[in-house]
Amino acid sequence: MRADLDGRDDQSMMPEWLLSLVDPARAHDVGLTLSWHARTMVLGWGILAPLAILTARYLKVLPSQSWPRELDNKTWWRCHWMGQSAVLVLSAVGFGLALLSGQNTGHEQMHRSFGYCVLALGCFQGLSGLLRGTKGGPTSPAPDGSLRGDHYDMTLRRQLFESFHKIFGYLALFMMMGAVASGLWATNAPRWMWLVLSLWWTGLTAAAVVLQRKGWAVDTYQAIWGPDPVHPGNWAEKPAHAARAAIYSKKRDM
């Protein structure tokens, strides 16, 4: 009988622990406006943004795709730009809600600093995507039939875009974690919120590690046009491109 009672006590303590606040000395009373600010930002940056990055990194070539015979699968591209566009819209809504609330918890200075950095990086990412240059190549030739394009030729403009877009994208991802964590602390969020987000990010990280080891991280250039050395970008200053192009060339000549 005693064991049964102890078992029931342990089971009842778990929901109570999950619903309890991280800091018992503070209340969790953020108001309607600020609570929706948190929801929109967590949905955008905490959930959609890392998922869109994972898609762009590892799903340029799908498992069902016979690469390099089947090229330029745009599933990853649509998921990435639509996902990140949704993040920017949610950011604008969340930022507006934060301004409307005017609420001061006394613990939000770090969150505000992280938040402004994330918003600035998000705006930069959106602008850099618009300024990435022309595509070119066999899948998007110019009206005169020319294959020239910033991406196909891997011009300096395209190389700078890829470098900055990737660097600032991952930087925004890490800043986002700081913004979300500091926001949860500032509002004294219950433990279940911390747990759910931690599990989500851990799951995405584990998936990234597995996919990286399985070789799913195919470069955008070769996902679109393949590793054939006839394409100029395959001999740009990228050792991985040149190595894969050389292997492809040998196999083709055999």
Image: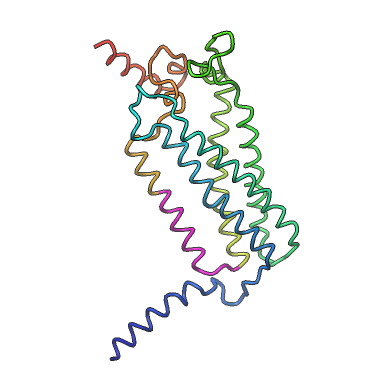
In percent of the image, x 42 and y 23: which residue is there? 222
Asked if residue 70 is positioned above or below residue 203 in the image, the reply reads above
Q: Is residue 4 left or right of residue 72?
A: left
Find residue 251 and report its horizontal and vertical position in percent: 27, 16
In percent of the image, x 39 and y 14: which residue is there? 229
Find residue 27 and report its horizontal and vertical position in percent: 62, 75
Front one among 84 and 116: 84
Find residue 132 and report its horizontal and vertical position in percent: 60, 26
Asked if residue 178 is positioned above or below residue 144 in the image, the reply reads below
Q: Residue furthest bottom?
A: 1
Which quarter of the image is occupied by the N terminus?
Answer: bottom left
Magenta-colored span: 188-205
Task: Give the main secondary structure of the magenta stretch.
Answer: helix
Which quarter of the image is occupied by the C terminus?
Answer: top left
Q: Residue furthest left?
A: 254
Q: How is the image coloured?
A: rainbow
Total marks in image? 0
Asked if residue 58 is positioned above or below residue 133 in the image, the reply reads below
In percent of the image, x 38 and y 84: which residue is there? 9
Does 195 lie within the magenta span? yes
In percent of the image, x 35 and y 23: which residue is there? 68
Find residue 250 and report its horizontal and vertical position in percent: 28, 14
Does 19 lie within the magenta span? no
Q: Is residue 100 left or right of residue 196?
A: right
Q: Is residue 43 left or right of residue 229?
A: right
